[in-house]
Image: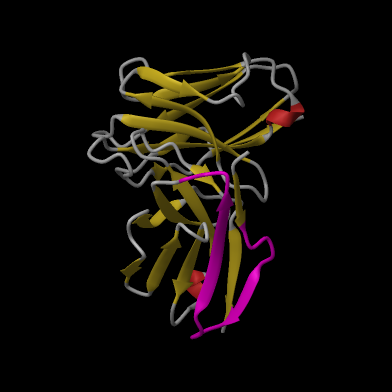
Amino acid sequence: SQKIEQNSEALNIQEGKTATLTCNYTNYSPAYLQWYRQDPGRGPVFLLLIRENEKEKRKERLKVTFDTTLKQSLFHITASQPADSATYLCALGKSGGYNKLIFGAGTRLAVHP
Amino acid sequence: DTGVSQDPRHKITKRGQNVTFRCDPISEHNRLYWYRQTLGQGPEFLTYFQNEAQLEKSRLLSDRFSAERPKGSFSTLEIQRTEQGDSAMYLCASSSNAQGDNEQFFGPGTRLTVL
């Protein structure tokens, strides 16, 4: 069955450092991958989309890579700030559909001053 | 606020009761999704509407669950004869039809507690 794995343990880093979150998947061939941020008690908020034919995407301090051979996406936040502390979810989707997303369990990031 | 809204934000009910949640998507979005999220997990897809048509239902959506989007605008999710296992956050999301891989805009969710 389809499986998406994200770092199950919280990631603790110092302010100013780069946070790197991992999303691995098996038994799935996504056409695209999306990353969302979720704060406690709130709905997810879209951050970035990367398609299967793209290797890397950047948006301000965020960078996403997508390796369909390794079946892995890496999500980087550079110059991290305490305000970046949240849970980050990766979500996979297939082409030809209506954007039904399969989510990972998320990784909690804590950025310490 | 022109985002996705959900009502109520919290619902506490006793086992066996029926509950109904409402979602108002972003007005120009014709795609609407319901997800369920339990603690420590990501959202799980429940069902999808394009305009008023319900095009897919997850196996997670048992016979006790029903969703509607009567005029292609707001949607309701009803759970009949609630069970303790139904306790979760119910999230609604909407997206436009412009691209298949469009970002989804999520509402704040309705947290259901079944006692």
User: From what the image shows, is residue B45 above or below residue B52?
Assistant: below
- Lateral position of residue B83 relative to residue B70, left or right: right
Residue at the extreme front of the image, as rendered: A69
User: From what the image shows, is residue B55 above or below residue A1?
Assistant: above
User: How many numbered marks appear?
Assistant: 0
User: From what the image shows, is residue B112 above or below residue A108?
Assistant: above
- Lateral position of residue A102 relative to residue A60, left or right: right
B111 and A71: which is toward the camera: A71
Residue positioned 30% across, 37% down in the render: B26
User: From what the image shows, is residue B86 above or below residue A107?
Assistant: above
Find residue A35 and report its horizontal and vertical position in percent: 44, 56
Segment tinted magenta in the rendering: A6-29
Find residue B89 and report its horizontal and vertical position in percent: 60, 39
B52 and A30: which is toward the camera: A30
Q: Is residue A12 magenta?
A: yes
A109 and A93: which is toward the camera: A93
Residue positioned 59% across, 23% down in the render: B61
Residue positioned 41% across, 40% down in the render: A94
Find residue B64 and report its horizontal and vertical position in percent: 63, 15
A11 and A58: which is toward the camera: A58
- Lateral position of residue B100 relative to residue A73, left or right: left
**Which quadrant of the figure contains the N terminus of chain A?**
top right
Q: Is residue B103 magenta?
A: no
- Lateral position of residue A17 relative to residue B49, left or right: right
Query: What is the image's colouring?
Result: secondary structure
Find residue B23 and report its horizontal and vertical position in percent: 43, 30
Image quadrant in which you'd find residue B50: top left
Residue positioned 52% across, 76% down in the render: A19
**Which quadrant of the figure contains the C terminus of chain A?**
bottom right
